[in-house]
Amino acid sequence: MKRRIVLILMVLPLLLVDNHTYAAEAPFGLRIYEIGHAPNFKLNNSDGEAFELDSTRGQWVFLHFWASWCGPCRKEMPLIQKLSEKINSDKFRIVMVNTSEDEDTVFTFLATLSIDIDTLMDTDGQVTEAWKPRGLPTTFLIDPHGKVRYQAIGGRQWNNPVYINFLKTLISNQ
Amino acid sequence: MNTALILLAGTLGVATQSLHTRTNDILIEFAPRTPDQMTSFYEARGFPKAMLDKLKHTCYITVRIHNTSQQQIWHDLGNWKFSVNGKPLIREHRDVWKQRWQDMGIPLRFQSTFRWTLLPETLDYLPSEIEGGNIILPRTDQLITLKANFKTGEDQQGPVINIEYDQLKCADDSPTKSEP
């Protein structure tokens, strides 16, 4: 019995820490979305370099699905750029996934907006299909253990201090 | 907080007439797209002619739903009933379109883009949230009546919101005839 109590006392703080780690209150527009492990995928970026989602363990991942034809995506892209500039941490990674467009379209779009964030090319749309965002743009936040934690459907003011501070809190609680 | 599915609103300009219905809790706006407007959007994205030929014979309407309440609202297209002169007008589910494109051998990338332009079949709207997309109906030159209901509350047990709107119509490319 004594042994069991000791064991519980040892494990309890770990459980509390795990709950506490991600307990920061999400700002408006970010939904808690705990669907378990993030489905892995492999895609090339626009330079043809391979990327695998599972390689991001240990980082918070801002996984963003977008397309150039989507009006809110156009508005949101510069804000994501600013976000990337304001959170410069190796514990945070922005992963952009373009849905079903070709490289010419993507290059032109990013160049027009002067965006220098790299994007992955989901040319046949099947990774997007697997992730099933309910609309475009959609952003998922994945924790350092590879679990999906939050979702934002639609465009957000990502350069707003509310979001930046929230993300910084997540990172620092890591 | 718009989704991409309001895309056509921005992309196609303001030539179309906006229609809407509202209650204390919800605002629903409709923007019927002409066949030319709709197919030119998809054509610009490289859609095959076979897809465009299918789409241009449909009634294509961009819908924007705004939760103006302080509670969660649950949208389910299964609870939207369209009719013309009392007879049901059947909206084709996105799975029907998916199967059609597969049968036609349409490349996956175009299937995917098409899917993202549709209004989600189900979606929960948080307070103040605005999301949208397109619905596709059989083409008709008659006024269309929509009856829809929405569950509310986090547990979907709140008061049901019922809407009825009888001024919905398909958009036409032909010039508007002036009244005599």
Image (tube, coloured by chain):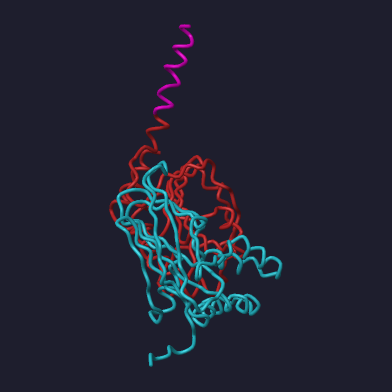
Identify the residue shown where x is 44% and y is 18%: A10
Q: Picture coordinates of residue B133 (x, y %)?
A: 46, 65
Location of the N terminus of chain B by quadrant is: bottom left
Identify the residue shown where x is 45% and y is 16%: A8
Looking at this view, name the residue that lies furthest to the bottom: B180
Q: Picture coordinates of residue A11 (x, y %)?
A: 45, 21
Magenta span contains residue A15 = yes
Q: Main secondary structure of the magenta part?
A: helix
Residue situated in front as seen by the camera: B80 or B6: B80
Q: Which chain is red?
A: A
Q: Picture coordinates of residue A130 (x, y %)?
A: 59, 53
Q: Is residue B45 above or below residue A49?
A: below
Q: Picture coordinates of residue A13 (x, y %)?
A: 40, 24
Looking at this view, name the residue that lies furthest to the front: B86
Q: Is residue A80 visible?
A: no
Magenta span contains residue B98 = no
Chain B rendering hue: cyan
Question: What range of the chain is rendered magenta?
Answer: A1-16
Looking at this view, name the residue that lies furthest to the top: A1
Residue situated in front as seen by the camera: A102 or A26: A26
Q: Count the marks: how many? A: 0
Q: Is residue A66 left or right of residue B24?
A: right
Residue situated in front as seen by the camera: B92 or A57: B92
Q: Is residue A97 visible?
A: yes
Identify the residue shown where x is 37% and y is 43%: A170
